[in-house]
Amino acid sequence: MLRCAVLALLAGHAFAAGFENIGAEFFGPGTKAEMLTLEQAIELALNNNLDAKFEHVGIAIEEARRRVAAGNFDPIFSTTAIRESIRRPQNANDFTSVDAVQQEAQIEAINANTNAVRGAQGLPPISQHDVTVGIRETIFDQQNDRLNSQLQGRTPWGMRYGFQVEANKLRNTFTGDLRTVFPEYQTTATVTLIQPLLKNFGPAANLADLRVARLNKKTQFFTWKQRVSTTVQSVIGVYYEMLYAMRDVDVKQDAIAAGEKLLAQNKRRLELGFMSPIDVRQAEVAVSTDREALLSSKGLFMERQFALKRLVLDELQSGDHRIFVPMTAPRLPVPKLDRADFMQTALARRYDYQGALLDAEAQNVRLRFARNQLWPQVDLVGTYGVNGLEGSYGESFGRAFTAHTPEWTAGVQVQIPLGFVKERAQLNLVKGLKEQAVLKIKQTELNIGVDVDTVISRIITNQQRVDTARQTRELNEEAVRVAYKRLEEGQISSFDVIEQQRKLYDAKSRELAAIAELNKSVSQLWLATGTILDRQGIYFDK
């Protein structure tokens, strides 16, 4: 066992050295060959594939959208603090109400009483406004502090609630006011409730955005899983194509070696007089043709190399001259081809089908919301508040919350759009989206059926190709041995041997290609039935 392992390791290094030369033809000197197993290639793709990363970021985006929708039910606290200073002049001679006349009389009485007191005390009287000519100006002075705090929000049933507390400090005076003015402290506390009865009533209307966001997140999670599955299958397919291309290079090199051997023999026979110059020339043409075929095989290997790098690397590396050399991978087992079982498994496991079902469910949520919006807006409104007025904030609060002076309102608000044009259009839009979602489900079911049938057909065809190519290769090997023997006996020309050799190596290439295609078609069957990740032992952390 140890000897076999050592021989396999030496063979692997030999492959690496050979394909480092292939890389040097494309990248120049300094190319480094790196052995890569299929498991390592899949692991690199799972860690680095940009398409899978792109879809994975989409999960975080949908989670953020879900949180945005949930945030609509977060209570909102707001507070406002304002200081006011208002000085407003008025013409004292311009009486516009009975209150103004009484206020003027009170001012005159207050001033007269004050001057009488000052006269008794031997003090000069307070100067009065000149009332003989012009306008007497009275300036009203307001110095106010206002504080307002509110807490408001919305429930899943649509009820909007609010709690407001307002505390004000008010000081009002005017020109010529000789009183000692004390500020007054006002406090009000109010609870407001608005409950929709028709439109915007219930969870179907108020939780629609949140429910759709949750479904979209699940759908995006399935989209990411489907992308990972597709990536894994692509890596498996490219890896077996690289194995085919690598072995085909060996076949082409063997063809060149066989052609050069035949060329040397023809030159020797020409020297001995047993062949003509045309036989030597035909052998030289065959060797040149085989070299062209070798270049094509090397180019195919590099194309598959670039396709693998596109799947397993996550950034552009201009100085990266690595060449990934695949190691021998086992042939994938061909399962029993039971279409009914495959269809049942695919419908239960395909992530794109599960995503289509979730999308239809999201449209059902939107449809229920759109139908709710066709109702008129009928809201039951109620408020309850208390008031307090004292000489300090504390006393004012205490006075208010004894419910000494309560106030309340109750009523109904009705809003009816004339025509419901917007609401009907929104309903028609959602109905169209729902119909598309149903069609998408049917389309996905059809795609699953076609995918399964296609892969089954490919597996059957590729199995037949492998068997036929193997038989063709074995027959050509025997034909080449017979051709060499007949050439030695002089029964055929060198051209006949060249043709038999070309057929042999072409058959070897076709056999390798058929094996690679069979392995690819098995991995495609795993993808079509949604089981490829399980087959590779890949599971998602919930």
Image (cartoon, rainbow, N blue to C red):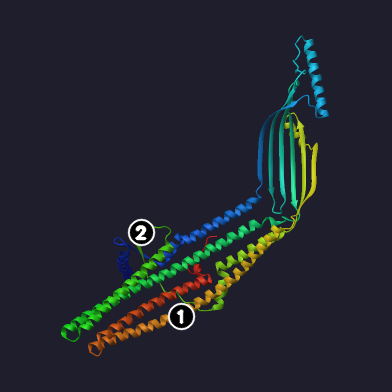
Circle 1 — which element? Answer: helix
Question: Tag 2 or tag 1, which sits nearer the N-term?
Answer: 2
Q: Amino acid at mark 2?
A: Asp
Disc 2 packing (10 Å; few <14; some 14–19; many ≥20): few
Look at the picture and state if 481 lies above or below 23: below
Disc 1 packing (10 Å; few <14; some 14–19; many ≥20): some
| Residue 391 on image: x %, y % | 74, 28
Q: Pick the quarter of the image with the N terminus.
A: bottom left
Nearest to the observer: residue 18 or residue 428: 428
Seen in the image, is 379 located left or right of residue 494?
right
* Residue underneath mark 2: 320
Q: Residue furthest left?
A: 272
Picture quarter containing residue 142?
Answer: top right
| Residue 384 on image: x %, y % | 77, 43
Nearest to the observer: residue 433 or residue 447: 433
| Residue 539 on image: x %, y % | 51, 64
Circle 2 — which element? Answer: loop
Picture quarter containing residue 286?
Answer: bottom left
Look at the picture and state if 494 lies above or below 254: below
State the residue at coordinates (66%, 35%).
81
Nearest to the observer: residue 91 or residue 35: 91
Q: Which mark is residue 461?
A: 1
Q: Amino acid at mark 1?
A: Thr
Seen in the image, is 268 located left or right of residue 386?
left
State the residue at coordinates (61%, 69%).
439
Q: Which mark is residue 399?
A: none
